[in-house]
Image (cartoon, rainbow, N blue to C red):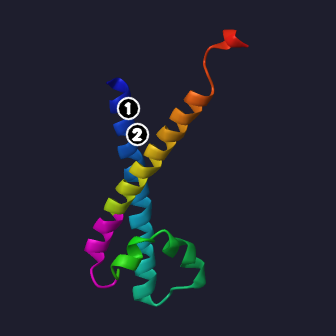
Amino acid sequence: MAMAKRGVRIWLVCAFVLATVRIGAFAFVEYRERTGTQALTSLPLVLLLLPEGLVLAPRSHPILFAGLLGFGSTILTFLVLVLFNAIQFIIRIRIPDDKSAL
């Protein structure tokens, strides 16, 4: 049970950090757009806003878009952690822990 709580804690921390980075990038890109100082150097920050940027136009509802970024970050981190757990499970199956067989 302790491992499950630890996994949930890791997931929540990762989701929070990713959501904070993505919402911060959105705020910076939105600021640059509103002040007319956008440049090609902010393109990597725009890529952080995908795929949610394709679903909803950020300029129309910025608060809703920020919430969507947070939700998408949570889903993304969940999928990545499930993938990592599946890879660990497959590795454990293929490599036996019993060293006496060698």
User: Which residue is located at x 35 percent, y 80 percent?
Assistant: 58
Nearer-the-camera pick, 77 or 38: 77
Residue 56 numbered mark, or none: none
Q: Position of residue 39 (x, y in %)?
A: 56, 85
Residue at numbered disc 1:
6
User: Which residue is located at x 33 percent, y 61 percent?
Assistant: 70
Nearer-the-camera pick, 23 or 7: 7
Residue 10 numbered mark, or none: 2
The amino acid type, in three-letter code, at marker 1 is Arg
Label 1 CA crowd tier, 10 Å (few <14, some 14–19, many 20+): few
User: Which residue is located at x 61 percent, y 30 percent?
Assistant: 94
Range shown magenta: 59-69
Predominant SS of the magenta segment? helix
State which quarter of the image contains the C terminus.
top right
Quarter of the rendering containing residue 13: top left
Q: Position of residue 8 (x, y in %)?
A: 34, 38
Task: Give the answer, above or below, for where 100 lies relative to 9.
Answer: above
**Labelled pair 2, 1 in contact (Cβ < 8 Å):** yes
Label 2 CA crowd tier, 10 Å (few <14, some 14–19, many 20+): some
Q: Alpha-carbon distance for marks 2 and 1? A: 6 Å
The amino acid type, in three-letter code, at marker 2 is Ile
Residue 62 falls left or right of residue 48: left
Task: Give the answer, above or below, for where 100 lies relative to 71.
Answer: above
Task: Give the answer, above or below, for where 89 lies relative to 21.
Answer: above
State which quarter of the image contains the N terminus.
top left
- For label 1, the SS is helix
Q: Position of residue 40 (x, y in %)?
A: 59, 83
Residue 70 falls left or right of residue 82: left
Quarter of the rendering containing residue 51: bottom left
- For label 2, the SS is helix
